[in-house]
Image: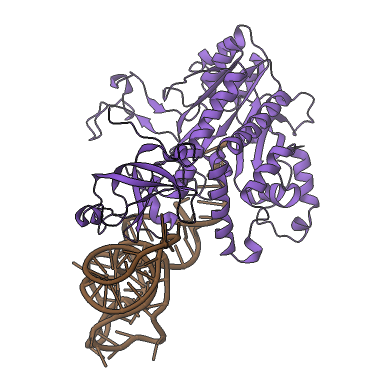
RNA sequence: UCCUCCCUAGCUCAGUUGGUUAGAGCAUCUGACUGUUAAUCAGAGGGUCGCUGGUUCAAGUCCAGCGGGGGGAGCCA
């Protein structure tokens, strides 16, 4: 057996002092020809391995370069120096893999996030990214735990879909047809997809929601958690072409139930991270505080990372209707002083400056905005009854988070067949192609609701990372598909 | 896609009104030191100034095109 090692996280608890142990990991620094800081990814804290002078030959010691991998056996002892409680007194030292220090890109010094983004294959070995991706893992686990404990069924919705009706964004085409122009064409010049692999035009999914609704009509409570794809040419710090989304879909739920679920969900995830990853959160908190110090005072965040997370967990989210939100904006001194670039009026699709004002200036906490004008929302959202003519609204809700903007988008779904069909027709959505979807409304339709939470945006919120490309291992963005 | 800023050593940056041999800190290498904490001290090596073209006696510096990146906007999660 090769893997008879003990993880560094375990060793640092100090329970094995006095015992002979085996450690494997990577060299972070080698100081004074005596002290190796070894990291194995189980924690950001390094284990100090002490090589006493004269025990190992110079040839071996020279190979202890940053990034090299090691196997060390020795006795775990209470540290003789300050700065750590335990250290490993090396008895044997084996270099598993050398790392040419002239070529290894990660140096024992600060690197910019932009530089590390281009070295995404190695950036896990840095403290910042190790903390981020351990948190990402924890949050992913917590998502399954949250829904599993509530009796939800994890439904795997397809990655390749034929429907392009949802209109959530531009889609990536999936095809095996030749791209050299020799693909068969129809009389009108369009590509003849009957010859394609699936016999029709197919795409990568933009959302698992419609399939999720099918599951909810049998299991009552389902959720999806998987990758989604948008071919939008978005170049921002909060958009990816490939991202992960969590989409619960719940039968016998109205908009209020939906909001309750979303709020409990977000608070659960943050609480889980604080209970299981506090060390990493503290590291990121300190990193962020350091970064804030570089900024001019008027651009600094009001709260630290952990402080912000505590506030979200400890306070109810603010809930306002779209109409109230518009009213708040219109009455704001910000509006009266004409500080908004875009005008405010009932019916507009709020701009990010408006959302930011509500969340960051007015309420200073997460805000749930409900009942948006029907004209600016998707076809499947439930029309509210008793609306004033020309001011129809739908039972939609968006959760806006400080610093990130929209983190959740959801709604109660239109369960009434005639109203749904009328809405689809008005929005030019082909009813025949969506017949499978409409069957849910034909056979035992029930009120139901669901939402989508962008996983990376959630990871951004919890880690405080400003750029979404730094919270997914290998980011896919326009003009960038490395690794 | 639009607006804006940027691209100089491995990294982070400086480089004056265009003018000799393009600099610094860190990293790396060599040596010294040896209970260090991003060790310290001394020395050394390291550059097609993003690419292509143009203006000029002369371009890292000015102009144009292309490529890449940051920030903001739109679209959204």
Residue A285: x and y in percent read 58, 51
Q: Is residue A240 in sight in this rendering?
A: no
Which one is in front, A460 or A259?
A460
Residue A153 visible in the snapshot: yes
Which of A465/A403 is in front?
Answer: A465
Q: Colour of chain A?
A: purple
Percent of width and height locating residue A108: 37, 58
Indicate left or right for A73 with A164 as reference: left
Looking at the rendered image, the quarter that the N terminus of chain A falls into is top left
> In which quarter of the view is residue A219 placed?
top right
Name which residue lies at 61% across and 24% down. A380
Q: Position of residue A26 (x, y in %)?
A: 34, 46
Quadrant occupied by the C terminus of chain A: top left
Q: Colour of chain B?
A: brown
Q: Is residue A159 above or below residue B77?
A: above
Image-quadrant location for residue A213? top right
Report x, y in % for residue A251: 64, 15
């Amino acid at each position: 057996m090769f893997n008879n090692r003990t993880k560094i996280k375990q060793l640092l608890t100090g329970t094995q002092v006095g015992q002979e142990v085996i450690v494997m990991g990577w060299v972070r620094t080698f100081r004074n020809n005596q002290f190796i800081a070894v990291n194995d990814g189980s924690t950001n804290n390094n284990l100090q391995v002490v090589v006493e002078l004269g025990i190992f030959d110079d040839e071996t010691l020279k190979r202890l370069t940053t990034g090299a991998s090691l196997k060390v056996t020795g006795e775990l002892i209470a540290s003789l120096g300050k700065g750590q409680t335990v250290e490993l007194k090396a008895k044997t030292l084996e270099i598993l893999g050398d790392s040419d220090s002239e070529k290894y890109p990660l140096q024992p010094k600060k690197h910019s996030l932009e530089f590390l983004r281009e070295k995404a294959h190695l950036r896990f070995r840095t403290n910042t990214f190790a903390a981020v991706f351990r948190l990402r893992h924890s949050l992913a686990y917590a998502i399954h735990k949250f829904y599993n404990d509530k009796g939800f069924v994890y439904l795997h919705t397809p990655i390749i879909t034929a429907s392009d009706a949802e209109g959530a964004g531009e889609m990536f085409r999936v095809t095996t047809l030749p791209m050299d122009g020799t693909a068969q064409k129809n009389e009108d010049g369009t590509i003849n997809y009957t010859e394609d692999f699936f016999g029709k035009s197919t795409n990568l999914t933009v959302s698992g929601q419609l399939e999720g609704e099918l599951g909810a009509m049998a299991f009552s409570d389902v959720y999806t958690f998987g990758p989604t794809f948008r071919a939008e040419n978005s170049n921002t710090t909060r958009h990816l072409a490939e991202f992960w989304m969590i989409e619960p879909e719940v039968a016998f739920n109205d908009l209020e139930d939906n909001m309750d679920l979303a709020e409990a969900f977000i608070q659960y995830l943050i609480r889980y991270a604080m209970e299981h990853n506090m060390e990493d959160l503290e590291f990121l908190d300190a990193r962020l505080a350091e970064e804030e110090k570089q900024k001019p005072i008027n651009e600094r965040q009001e709260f630290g990372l952990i402080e912000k997370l505590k506030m979200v967990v400890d306070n109810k989210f603010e809930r306002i209707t779209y109409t109230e939100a518009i009213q708040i904006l219109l009455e704001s001194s910000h509006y009266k002083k004409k500080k908004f670039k875009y005008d405010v009026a009932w019916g507009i699709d709020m701009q990010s400056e408006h959302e930011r004002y509500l969340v960051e200036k007015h309420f200073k906490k997460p805000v749930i905005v409900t009942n948006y004008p029907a004209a600016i929302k998707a076809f499947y959202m439930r029309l509210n009854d008793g609306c004033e003519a020309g001011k129809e609204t739908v039972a939609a809700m968006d959760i806006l988070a400080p610093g990130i903007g929209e983190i959740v988008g959801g709604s109660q779904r239109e369960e009434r067949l005639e109203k749904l069909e009328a809405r689809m027709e008005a929005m030019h959505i082909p009813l025949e192609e969506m017949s499978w979807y409409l069957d849910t409304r034909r056979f035992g339709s029930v009120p139901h609701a669901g939402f989508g939470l962008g996983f990376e945006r959630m990871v951004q919120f919890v880690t405080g990372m400003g750029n979404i490309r730094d919270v997914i291992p290998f980011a896919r963005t326009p003009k960038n598909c490395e690794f």
